[in-house]
Image: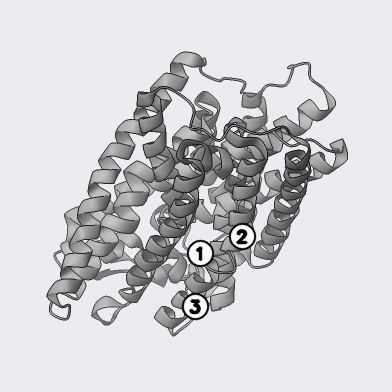
């Protein structure tokens, strides 16, 4: 197959510094803007959406949460669009985030950006494996409440299934029909959770919508909720996703982003607000643990959330897979030749084994969302994107436009530090409350 030809592994020099950027072993420039829109929508309406009522609305309340959802979406759309516009900076496509940073700043920024992105995607994938473990655990307790099967066991099972999927899907573009299944699965668990929460809310006594905890806890929880807000809208891998889209790459990517931040947001907003309305500050980090209704209906929702998490994880693991396949993978044969499959089993299996171990060790989903938002979503999507756009267009922007970008850079730098402190505090607090390999 052409996309696995050894010639794809030759390197080319960037204009800035001595950074050598390898060509990719994966397929690029083949997908329609609609397929990209489905990838983005799969991410924003993944099973993570079942946690936003508890991890965003509970710490922020009605006003902060509702206003925050709108403002975070607007700022996220803006940041992603300006990043998409510099994809072909200097007359060449930059198919990885680190390639673009290396082109603008040089080799140190290339390595630093890859480090940030690796942390970002590793923590997102950790969250997906936690989610994929929580879903069958929630289904298990519907039928048996003997605590024989604990959450870490389900997390290990989830990690194994994610690995099987990774062995069979060689690259991001190969998802194709799986994206349709993913969005269908999202509709199932969102609709079920919405209807069951609506019924519970109608029958429930008045709920408490006050932000829980002491003054200090409220402050740190609010900062964490703010980080969760921006985590929910962003991927941290926009150039890698844009790399798969057909020409014109900027116009098609902007179309996909507009789709994501309009039609794609409707299910996410609906379930987030409905869950908080129904259960107030008692909403959990996994909404299907709150809802009541027919056992078989809840079981279907949990199965859908499990399967969707497996597919969605593959999207956010794809930059690491692409790096490993390009750097170390076999150079001959097709994607499903024995050598390629064996390589995926060994390397992707090892990567996901580490992910699964961390997920089982510290299964605190909300804390990982806050930590990811603080240490990678803010730097990658807002700080770096604004500064790269500023550097790429410094001779074209007016003073007011430059000031706007510097305001974004400064604001999100401060927020990133505050959110990082908050996230670490929350993880330390939960680690004291629960043992490692906790059965939450």
Give the number of the disc on residue 222.
Answer: none
Question: Where in the figure is residue 192, as x and y percent of width and height?
Answer: 77, 49
Measuring 44% from the left and 14% from the top, which residue is drawn there? 432
Question: Where in the figure is residue 111, as x and y percent of width and height?
Answer: 25, 52
Label 1 neighbour load within 10 Å: few <14, some 14-19, many 20+:
few
Q: Secondary structure at mark 1?
A: loop
Count of numbered labels shown in the rendering:
3
Q: CA distance from mark 1 to mark 2?
A: 9 Å
Measuring 70% from the left and 34% from the top, which residue is drawn there? 290
Q: Earlier in the sequence, mark 2 or mark 3?
A: 3
Q: Which quarter of the figure is the C terminus placed in?
A: top right
Q: Where is mark 2, residue-wise?
A: 337
Q: Is the residue 173 above or below the residue 280 in the image?
A: below
**Left or right of 362: which side holds 175?**
right
**Mark 1–mark 2 CB contact (< 8 Å):** yes
Q: Is the residue 186 above or below the residue 78 in the image?
A: above
Q: Which quarter of the figure is the N terminus placed in?
A: bottom right
Q: Earlier in the sequence, mark 1 or mark 2?
A: 1
Measuring 23% from the left and 48% from the top, which residue is drawn there? 413
Q: Secondary structure at mark 3?
A: helix
Q: Where is mark 1, residue-wise?
A: 332
Q: Where is mark 3, residue-wise?
A: 255
Question: Where in the figure is residue 377, as x and y percent of width and height?
Answer: 37, 50
**Mark 2–mark 3 CB contact (< 8 Å):** no
Q: Secondary structure at mark 2?
A: loop
Q: CA distance from mark 2 to mark 3?
A: 36 Å
């Amino acid at each position: 197959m052409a996309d696995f030809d050894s010639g794809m592994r030759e390197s080319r020099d960037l204009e800035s510094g001595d950074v050598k950027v390898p060509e990719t072993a994966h397929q690029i420039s083949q997908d329609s803007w609609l397929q990209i829109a489905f990838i983005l929508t799969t991410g924003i309406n993944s099973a993570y959406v079942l946690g936003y009522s508890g991890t965003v609305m509970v710490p922020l309340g009605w006003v902060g949460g509702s206003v925050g959802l709108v403002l975070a979406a607007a700022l996220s759309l803006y940041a992603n669009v300006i990043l998409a516009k510099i994809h072909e900076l200097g007359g060449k496509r930059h198919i990885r985030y680190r390639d673009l940073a290396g082109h603008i700043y040089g080799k140190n920024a290339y390595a630093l950006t890859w480090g940030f992105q690796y942390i970002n995607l590793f923590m997102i994938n950790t969250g997906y494996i936690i989610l994929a473990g929580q879903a069958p655990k929630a289904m298990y307790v519907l039928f048996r409440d003997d605590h024989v099967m604990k959450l870490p066991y389900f997390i290990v099972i989830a990690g194994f299934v994610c690995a099987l999927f990774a062995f069979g899907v060689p690259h991001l573009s190969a998802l194709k029909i799986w994206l349709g299944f993913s969005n269908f699965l999202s509709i199932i668990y969102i609709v079920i959770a919405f209807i069951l929460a609506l019924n519970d809310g109608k029958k429930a006594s008045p709920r408490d919508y006050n932000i829980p905890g002491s003054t200090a806890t409220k402050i740190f929880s609010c900062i964490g909720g703010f980080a969760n807000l921006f985590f929910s809208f962003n991927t941290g891998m926009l150039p890698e996703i844009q790399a798969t889209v057909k020409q014109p790459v900027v116009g098609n990517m902007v179309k996909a982003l507009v789709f994501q931040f309009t039609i794609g947001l409707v299910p996410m907003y609906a379930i987030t607000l409905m869950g908080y309305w129904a259960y107030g500050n008692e909403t959990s980090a996994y909404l299907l643990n709150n809802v009541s209704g027919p056992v078989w209906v809840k079981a279907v929702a949990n199965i859908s959330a499990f399967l969707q998490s497996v597919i969605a994880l593959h999207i956010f693991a794809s930059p690491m897979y692409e790096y490993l396949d390009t750097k170390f993978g076999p150079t001959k044969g097709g994607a499903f030749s024995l050598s390629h499959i064996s390589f995926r089993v060994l390397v992707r299996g090892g990567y996901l084994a580490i992910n699964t171990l961390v997920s089982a060790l510290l299964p605190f989903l909300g804390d990982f969302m806050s930590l990811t938002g603080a240490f990678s979503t803010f730097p990658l999507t807002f700080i770096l994107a604004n500064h790269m756009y500023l550097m790429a267009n410094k001779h074209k922007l007016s003073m007011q436009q430059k000031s706007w970008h510097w305001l974004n850079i400064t604001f999100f730098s401060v927020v990133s530090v505050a959110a990082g402190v908050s996230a670490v505090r929350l993880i330390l607090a939960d680690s004291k409350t629960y043992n490692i390999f906790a059965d939450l």
